[in-house]
Amino acid sequence: SVLERIDSVEEKVESYITVCSESAMERAAEIDKKLAAGEEVGPLAGVPCAIKDNMCTRDMLTTCASKMLYNFKPPYNATVVEKLNAAGTVTLGKVNMDEFAMGSSTENSYFKKTKNPYDLTKVPGGSSGGSAASVAADEAPFSLGSDTGGSIRQPAAFCGCVGLKPTYGSVSRYGLIAFASSLDQIGPLAKDVRDAAMVLDVIAGHDEKDSTSVNVAHPCYENALTGDIQGLKIGIPEEYIGDGIDGEVSSAIYAAIDNMKSLGAESENMNLPLNKYALPTYYMISSAEASSNLARFDGVKYGYRAEQFDDLVDMYCQSRSEGFGREVKRRIMIGTYALSSGYYDAYYKKAQQVRTMIMNDFNKAFEKYDVLVTPTSPTTAFGIGEKTTDPLQMYLADICTVSVNIGGLPAIVIPCGYDKNGLPIGLQIIGRPFGEATILNAAYALE
Ligand code: GLN
């Protein structure tokens, strides 16, 4: 039935880059057979899902929405894909995104522009726009996204679904095509908090193939959903909810906080004074790491290779010039500049120092508060084409999300109402490192 649904709405929504109907049906039949034989099938047996196209799937196109990888079929699965397979899920296909996960609207995809299912003239958010739109349009019961500076949470907010960015190190990045390795995390987008918790239960955990994955046992997240938030201490960072935030968005956030208080939580306004440096710090660090990570795409080992070139160096140049889109090139240039010997201290090193200070700000806040509650984005979904000519305007859309990645913290986004045009508004709940159970439960209490 989900494949039929894809058939009927995909023309309008365009969530998918690749739909794998045949392999999905085969896989479903295989699980049916196991069930009939009384074999072990896993906690998510038969549940269909969509995977963001920057996670490696064996023998299945994995393009990063880039011309550079238009024909890339990885010889192996990302750890998260292996874990979902072991839990019994059925992969429906690979969903659209901004090229190499750089963007906030999914308009930077080489292949297509995904639409917001709530209003087809609006963007679904980004970079995991296909992950969010597929769930919102019932083209998948859940999906995986990746979040470097908000790419799970902002599309979840724009498309009215639940999105969770886990603590850095709690989900393996093995097989996730890297954008900014010190910020990237994979997480679920789902219809509700319980679904998100169940998927996180499957994908979280140590992986020896990812040296940054943390070796600590995690609790069962689904069992943490009691709905009891009596005594929960909420901090409301004033920097996130003042100037520049749309009035309808802030009213919906305050209404959700009132709701939490009526359930026994306590809230207080507080400050994260270094937050004003989060956006430049993020764009400096993420671009520097991207320029290094993307050096591997040279037309030699995989993906696109230019047809016309004079010699080896020219082949690198032509392949990269033709294979990468404008936004990716912009980040590579910013990052290369920041890492160059004359500017390293002034830009990259400075950004790393500010990163530590921002983390200290959070640490101090979490001595006093259990969670911080904020908007996810200053506005609801914006129009397709509205920000494409002004990269800075696009970067400003990330103002509420990037600091969470700088701090390596977990954060969940849940729907908390609609604006006057019927577009969803997303509430962000930020937790302590490895505080997924707390934020999931706080979100669950509001459902
Ligand atoms: N919008 C942000 C960027 O363009 C975040 C992207 C992400 O989280 N992958 O970098």
Image (spheres, helix red, strand yellow):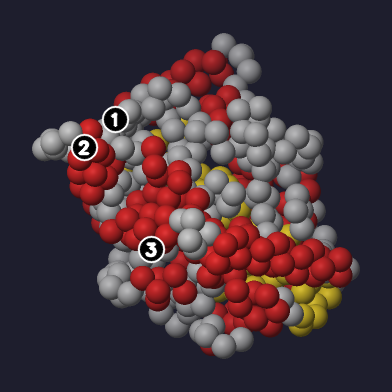
Q: Quadrant of the C terminus?
A: bottom right
Residue drawn 28% across the image and 41% down it: 68
Badge nearest the viewer, 3 or 1: 1
Q: Is residue 85 left or right of residue 130?
A: right
The kind of residue on which mark 3 rests is Ser
Q: Is residue 272 left or right of residue 230?
A: left
> Image height check: is 223 above or below 83?
below
Q: Is residue 363 visible?
A: yes
**Label 1 CB-ligand 1 distance < 8 A:** no
Q: CA distance from mark 3 to mark 2?
A: 31 Å
Residue drawn 78% across the image and 37% down it: 216
> Image height check: is 409 above or below 201?
below
Q: CA distance from mark 2 to mark 1?
A: 9 Å
If you read the primary sequence from the N terminus, does the residue marked by circle 3 or circle 1 appear first? 3
**Label 3 CB-ligand 1 distance < 8 A:** no
Between 126 and 124, the one nearer to me in the picture: 126
Question: Is label 2 in a helix, a strand or a loop?
Answer: helix
Question: Which residue is label 1 attached to?
Answer: 300
Between 398 and 339, the one nearer to me in the picture: 339
Q: Are marks 3 and 1 in contact (CB under 8 Å)?
A: no
Q: CA distance from mark 3 to mark 1?
A: 31 Å
Task: Say which mark, if any, is on residue 105.
Answer: 3
User: How many residues crowd mark 3 within 10 Å: few (<14), some (14–19), many (20+)?
Assistant: many
Position in image of residue 50 (x %, y %): 44, 41
If you read the primary sequence from the N terminus, does the residue marked by circle 3 or circle 2 appear first? 3
Position in image of residue 281 (x %, y %): 57, 66
Q: Is residue 222 left or right of residue 107?
A: right
Q: Are marks 2 and 1 in contact (CB under 8 Å)?
A: yes
Q: Quadrant of the N terminus?
A: top left
